[in-house]
Image (cartoon, rainbow, N blue to C red):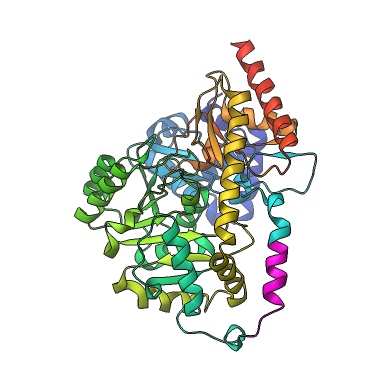
Amino acid sequence: MSIVKLLLSSSRGLSLVMKIIARLGPSMKKHKYQLIAAQLGSLIDSGKYPPGSKLPAHRELAKELQSTAVTVSKAYQLLAELGKIESFVGRGSYVGNTSLNSVIQAQEDDTVLNFSILQPCLQQNIQALQQQFTQQFSALDNPQLFGYSENTGLLEHRRAGAKWCAQYGLEVANADQLILTNGAQNALASIIALYSKEGDYIALEAQTYPGILAICKYMGRKVLPIAMDEQGMLPQALMQQCKICKPRMVIVVPSQQNPTAATMGHARREALAKVIAEQDVWLVEDEIYAFLNTVKMPAISNFVAEKSFYISSLSKAISPGMRCGYLRVPESQYSTLVDYIRATLWLPSPFMFEVASAMIDSGNAFRWAEQQKMIAAQRQRLVTQYLSDYRLQRQRSSYSCWLHLPVNCQAEGFCATAKKQRLLLSSASYFSSSGQAANAVRLSVMAIAEEDDFVCGLQQLSKLLSSYAAQD
């Protein structure tokens, strides 16, 4: 049933909306757009139309409701302000969902197999982490750790961060260009807040990390989706959109991209850097998965150092609980960003960075990151064993795989059915920056601690997928 028919036939919903409008006061009754928005919002909230569903064109809905396109436009605008829908120039309006809680389904029930969270396999190094924390906290004898520090952190902590970033492809001239943040998300939010304003376009991969979508939503930035292939963002597509829409910045995940695991080769990175150099746009390079690459790749930022911000952290390699982010900035922007972070955060916890620096300087951080990469590779081999009949996008050691579903198997329904079988998945709708989600799901291969449980989950998924194939 179409949204239009549902809107016209839902007498119970219409009655509820009329009561809501009545409570708003007599002066509000004449505003038809509020009635339309409330009824559409009710359909969205009830789940009748899941994230990614396309709404009718303004004129189409206006004709059915015997209203005007202007009234429907105002209703859609109200829904967009409430965060229920997203509108895209030339493509229409879609039911939106940028809730991180929806895609990152944390749970404490051991009987649930969680394929939704992208994190390290924590059980493998939890004991070593406990020992590292105990050792460092029992030896906190540096008075600077207990007071305020210059910039955003101690010099030795920034030097350790530079060492971490250099290991995975960044050419860091010196630690004075590195800023400490409360993880990668804090770095992203700071850059977007400081270098763009409400209403500006932010260029993103067509399928992207929900955390970026959430920041853009709450800060009032417009999302500009850029086409991708198996290596990620297409330079020519970015060039075209830069000329048309003039985005303030482009945010890219070049390695093991979330959710598609797309990874840029050397030539692609250089080509993208060339576009950045030629256009009036900042590059934000999120390389938190670079440690998973089987071959060390140069950071795109190496080619456009004065127009790029490079982000790394320990959350994916070591632990999400370590909110240690490293932000390399253009030399000309260092003091501006330091001032902004001091004004909004003051400084990240020196205690956490003391532990992180000890891990890096001792080599433990690199060994643990390599261990996680090996576990990911083994998990991907198991995915091949059980799901090879289906189209999968992934890398040899990626934390996730992008599973394309059979034609008769829709992502939202598949996730709902899987959840009833105690399998948590993430639908493609949560990752779409265009409003046109692929018919796919993202599978995290690392969050399930025990390999036997992981295999059990794959077997259940294979059986569920086969049931759809049998119906075809």
> Could one spot residue 459 in this view of the protein?
yes
Q: Residue at x 35, y 38 (%)?
A: 227
Q: Residue at x 49, y 36 (%)?
A: 395
Q: Main secondary structure of the magenta part?
A: helix
Q: Residue furthest front?
A: 362
Q: Residue at x 41, y 41 (%)?
A: 263
Q: Quadrant of the C terminus?
A: top right
Q: Is residue 50 above or below residue 279?
A: above
Q: Is residue 78 above or below residue 400?
A: below
x%, y% of residue 387?
A: 60, 24
Identify which residue, 292 or 15, lies in the foreground: 292
Rendering quarter of residue 162:
bottom left
Q: Which residues are magenta?
A: 129-141
Q: Is residue 138 magenta?
A: yes
x%, y% of residue 283?
A: 33, 57
Identify which residue, 371 or 420, lies in the foreground: 371
Q: Residue furthest left?
A: 278
Identify which residue, 420 or 338, lies in the foreground: 338
x%, y% of residue 219?
A: 45, 60
Rendering quarter of residue 386:
top right
> Could one spot residue 343 in this view of the protein?
no
